[in-house]
Amino acid sequence: MPLLLLLASPALAGLKRTYPYGPGEKFTYEIYWTVVYAGQATLEIMPDTEIQGVPARHFHAEARTSDFIDSFYKVRDTIDSWTDMAVDRTLRFEQRQREGDYEKDTLLSFDWQGMTLENRGIQGFKNTLDLPGDVLDSLSVLFHFRTHGLFQDRVISGLVTDGRKIVPGSGRVVGRETIETPFGDLDCFRVEPDTRDIGGVFKKSDDARIEMWFTADERRIPVRIRSQVAVGHFSLELVDVRGVPGFGQGGK
């Protein structure tokens, strides 16, 4: 049950990037499997810190299934990502997956001086990869994406990794829609990533389709995330916003 399914990358030439978020921002989503309430997920920006003496941003995500889903497939997943302050490259990535009987821990350490990535798991060292340039992980790409202004047909592309391989991907703005939310109707851009080369990263089926909706303003808040798979679709619907001035707790 992936939390975040989007690709992003460096800004197009001539378009200024902005950073419409900061520590204390927290989004809460209800997870649905087709129409069945399946649990809750959160995206949160933690206080800035340092990784090996380098100033770093810290992003955190969690997903957990509801009591009903727990009875046959309990999920307790957490992800932490630390990036440089520009949110262009990952410095460290930690993922803890507890999904039914499946358990997996992943630790990715990025050595940007040596241009290598070390991948470790529960059993210890797995592999290393050479870094060809700026690379992000599956969580930080979402926050990188939000640093870019959006408009119809804009394409943002770059590199993403799960520790086993580094692959290119892109996201395209394919439409503009009004989304009904607890905060009222929100004007949103709909984004579809091209995931043809990243099956090993996100473990998607051949006919899967991923879509995301961001507010069509300078905040670019992720309002909805939807993944179409063979057994239906999973969706994350925004239900609470904290740490965004003028938005959340009933405001827009």
Image (cartoon, grey):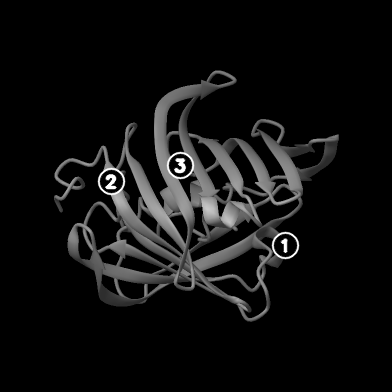
Tell me whether circle 1 and circle 2 mark residues in contact (CB < 8 Å): no
Mark 3: give few (<14), some (14-19) or many (20+) Cα within 10 Å: many
Image side of residue 197 versus residue 20, left or right: right
Per the image, the residue denoted by label 3 is: 87
Horizontal relation, residue 117 to residue 18: left or right: right
74 relative position to 58: left or right: right
Question: Which quadrant holds the N terminus?
Answer: bottom right
Q: Which mark is residue 241?
A: 2
Q: Nearer the viewer, residue 20 or 61?
A: 61
Q: Quadrant of residue 79?
A: top right
Q: Amino acid at mark 1?
A: Gly
Structural distance between the alpha carbons of marks 1 and 2: 32 Å
What amino acid type should be assigned to the residue bearing mark 3? Val
Residue 70: where, in percent of width, then height? 60, 51
Residue 182 in sight here: yes
- Tell me the crowding category of disc 1: few under 14, some 14 to 19, or many 20 or more residues within 10 angstroms, Cα based: some
